[in-house]
Image (cartoon, grey):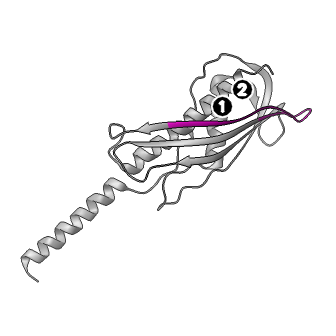
Amino acid sequence: MTIQNTLRRFGLLALLAGAAVLTGCATSANRDAMAADSIASSKKNPYTLSIRTGGGNETSALGSSEISNDDLRAAIEASVKKTALFKEVVQGKSGDYELSVSVARLTKPMFGASFTVEMEAGWSLIKTSDKSVVLRKSITSSHTASMGDSLVGVTRLRLAVEGAARNNIKQGLEAIAALNL
């Protein structure tokens, strides 16, 4: 083997290692980063709320960033607590109201300098005492993460997924806040 061939192989290995560092492994959306800090209402309902989520997926190391049902539920719960929209979020038992949020669509780009993620989720709020539907709404949101947010593609994608979920949660809670419960 010549020195020139050795240098070419070393250069190729260095290029592949650099690509691996820049792409990394996929990480799931962070529940704390998906939580909405505030909503456009200061309404505080004197009721308890239970939360169910569906339609989410676990992130695989070789796939792209996803939102798990548990992380979505935790983000909604944290958002409700931060905004004090309900008196209390109850787990493992029925609250005065039951909120069901199901991810219907999570559209993610494959590559690019800026990643825009779109999310659609079905929101349903039911009064548990009489099983009446108080809110049924499809909420669409999006968020763009640019290279200024992160040079690493998988991180940029995760940030866009988290932002789309955070915007969806904010819109959903604002729709609930607009109701007279």
Q: Main secondary structure of the magenta part?
A: strand
Residue at x-position 67% and y-position 35%: 77
| Left or right: 155, with 93 as reference point | left
Judged from this view, the residue extending furthest toward the top is 42
What is the quadrant of residue 46 in the picture?
A: top right
Image coordinates for residue 150, horizontal then vertical, percent? 35, 42
| Left or right: 80, with 162 as reference point | right
Residue at x-position 13% and y-position 75%: 6
Q: Secondary structure at mark 1?
A: helix
Image coordinates for residue 24, horizontal then vertical, percent? 38, 56
Image coordinates for residue 18, horizontal then vertical, percent? 26, 58
Q: How many marks?
A: 2
Q: How many neighbours does mark 2 have within 10 angstroms: few (below 14), some (14-19), or many (20 or more)?
A: many
The image shows residue 110, relative to residue 15, as above or below, that is: above
What is the quadrant of residue 20 in the picture?
A: bottom left
Residue 135 on the magenta segment: yes
Is residue 145 visible in the rendered image? The answer is: yes
Judging by the rendered image, the residue that carries numbered circle 1 is: 172
Which contiguous range is marked in magenta? 125-142
Question: Which three-letter amino acid code belongs to the residue tagged 1?
Answer: Gly
Q: How many neighbours does mark 1 have within 10 angstroms: few (below 14), some (14-19), or many (20 or more)?
A: many
Residue 128 on the magenta segment: yes
Image coordinates for residue 4, horizontal then vertical, percent? 8, 75
Question: Which three-letter amino acid code belongs to the residue tagged 2?
Answer: Ile
Residue at x-position 56% and y-position 33%: 167
The image shows residue 172, relative to residue 161, as above or below, that is: above
On the rendered image, what quadrant is the N terminus found in? bottom left
Asked whether disc 2 touches disc 1, contact meaning CB atoms under 8 Å apart, the reply is yes
CA gap, disc 2 and disc 1: 6 Å
Judging by the rendered image, the residue that carries numbered circle 2 is: 176
The image shows residue 39, relative to residue 99, as above or below, that is: above
